[in-house]
Image: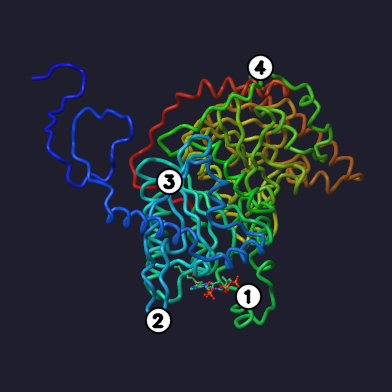
Amino acid sequence: MYCGTGRLRTITKKPIIENRFPPLPGRDIGFRYQVRSMDTQYHATLETLERLRAESISAGGPQQKEAQHQKGKLMARERLDLLLDDGSFEEFDVLKLGRGGSLRDEKSYLGDGVITGHGSIDGREVFVFSQDFTVIGGSLGEAHAQKICKVMDLAVKVGAPIIGLNDSGGARIQEGVDALAAYGEIFHRNVRASGVVPQISCIMGPCAGGAVYSPSITDFVFMVEDSSYMFVTGPSVVKTVTHQDITSEDLGGARVHAQKSGVAHFTVPNDVLCLREVRRLISYLPSSNQHRAPILDLSDSPERSDPVLDYLVPGNSHQTYDMHVLIHSILDGAEFMEVHAGFARNIICGLGRLGGQTVGLVANQPAVLAGVLDNDASFKAGRFVRFCDAFNIPLISLVDVPGFMPGPDQEHGGIIRHGAKLLYAFTEATVPRISVIIRKAYGGAYLVMNSKHIHCDVNYAWPTAEIAVMGPKGAAEVIHRKAIYEADDPESVLNEKMEEYRSTFANPFLAAQRGYIDDVIFPRHTRPHLIRTLQVLDSKRTKGPDRKHGNIPL
Ligand code: HXC
């Protein structure tokens, strides 16, 4: 009977016949066992292993490697070297063999055109796959997909981000329906992993056809300028069906997706910067929905105030200012990772830190379209809010919104549906939520932007805040239409009524009196207020009604 705290083990000194690992020189392993000598067969096995590994590692061959570099693209392994901490990569399935296609004379490759495994970024584990365009165009066959699925499964099991480096001709044509089925397996896992572990896609070459749907389900898409593109149907199909001539770049290049479609969250000039930016993004994120984002102390005092902010908002409410000034002023070290920087620029979304803690910022941008909410802005911010909520990242909104964009384009384009997405996203978010009303907070857009009325936790306003059903001009024209219309000098009556409305409603005091604003703060003290409030909200708990899931108006 053994009752101590040490290890309990009965050691039977029977010979281990098949032991392949001789004891290290000079190391006393505590008991005798019989070591098989380094016989010829064992040597041969080692040589085979070395040969197979070398074959897998250089599968595409030197010419393909040269061609890849000529296109300004790095090789799949070079990319992983840059992405991961030095020496941290552990590769899986280096010996997995492609299954070959259904056509004759098809070569199977070891590794099957994708490198998979795990490694660390700043010491935190991530799972990765990196498609190798030099092997059958990085096309996705059955074995290739099985390798990707394996790391996705493990990432979810252990709770670590998945990073995919995509450079592929799409479904491997020779494998027919099996290649399509393989994509389905990946899509399935993308959806299962959504909201469980962060998923990041880097598009570093072609990504066409149904293959685009895996990255588009993931949380963040990076695209490398001039060497990557994404489209469901390529230029030749476009030509056949619509008779339009268009290049791959104009159809689905990085700039198009970063500025027009919103598919790409980040664009980067080259592979090296892409991988560096992925590392930066990871530094803001938790490893999974069961973790908190890492705390990073940038030695920026939580008490720091900024007198410049007292003068940020112009006296004339028609004048604009750049909301980035406020964002950079309040965040730790002025560091801000903006998401979708080129898309729907009338709203700003991104990650930063306050008191070392990652926060998600959603801010109207008065300098672009006066900060109005339109379809793209609602979609952009709605998705960002949901990401933050899924991954325990507190949300802060900085509000200066004159309303929803009027007009048939927006109405017919679905501003009702899209605006509802943002409303839904903020309302359902259970992470700590703080709002600061900087200037305009008009009508429904005010409600949508994380107002008290949709249960934001703490709402501040600057003295410049104007919280009202609509702007003074619109309001005066509606309420006093008859008086203005019948006056000898309609303009002076309009101005008089506007001023009356402005002094009564366009300030934070009525809302504060009603308790809809928790405090009217001096602009210079915004940062200390936010940090203190984040601390107090840290232990926030909420429990909604039981349900399978809500039905966000997608
Ligand atoms: C098999 C492929 C391939 C594919 C490329 N290759 N794509 N092999 N299946 N899908 C092979 C090429 O035959 C070539 O082999 C090598 O990869 C490099 O390709 P190149 O054409 O020489 O390179 P490049 O000129 O740079 O052109 C890249 C390309 C082009 C634009 C991606 O290869 C291409 O158009 N491929 C087909 C793209 C496509 O239509 N894929 C299916 C999309 S539909 P060799 O032996 O000559 O070096 C799809 C459905 C997914 O993916 C559905 C999910 C539900």
Query: Disc 4 vs disc 1: Cβ atoms closer than 8 Å?
Result: no
Write down the residue under mark 3.
Answer: 90
Q: Which numbered disc, 3 or 2, marks the residue closer to the eye?
A: 3
Q: Residues within 10 Å of mark 3 (few under 14, many from 20)?
A: few
Q: Residues within 10 Å of mark 2 (few under 14, many from 20)?
A: few
Instruction: State yes or no: Cβ of the residue under disc 2 lies below 8 Å from any atom of ligand 1.
Output: no
Side (left or right) of 341 relative to 294 = right
Tell which of 458 and 283 is nearer to you. 283
Going by the numbered disc 2, the residue's amino acid type is Leu
Instruction: State yes or no: Cβ of the residue under disc 3 lies below 8 Å from any atom of ligand 1.
Output: no
Query: Disc 3 vs disc 1: Cβ atoms closer than 8 Å?
Result: no
Q: Secondary structure at mark 3?
A: strand
Residue 442 in sight here: yes
Q: Secondary structure at mark 1?
A: helix
Write down the residue under mark 4.
Answer: 303
Going by the numbered disc 4, the residue's amino acid type is Glu
Q: Quadrant of the N terminus?
A: top left
Q: Secondary structure at mark 4?
A: loop
Q: Which numbered disc, 1 or 2, marks the residue closer to the eye?
A: 2
Q: Tag on residue 103?
A: 2
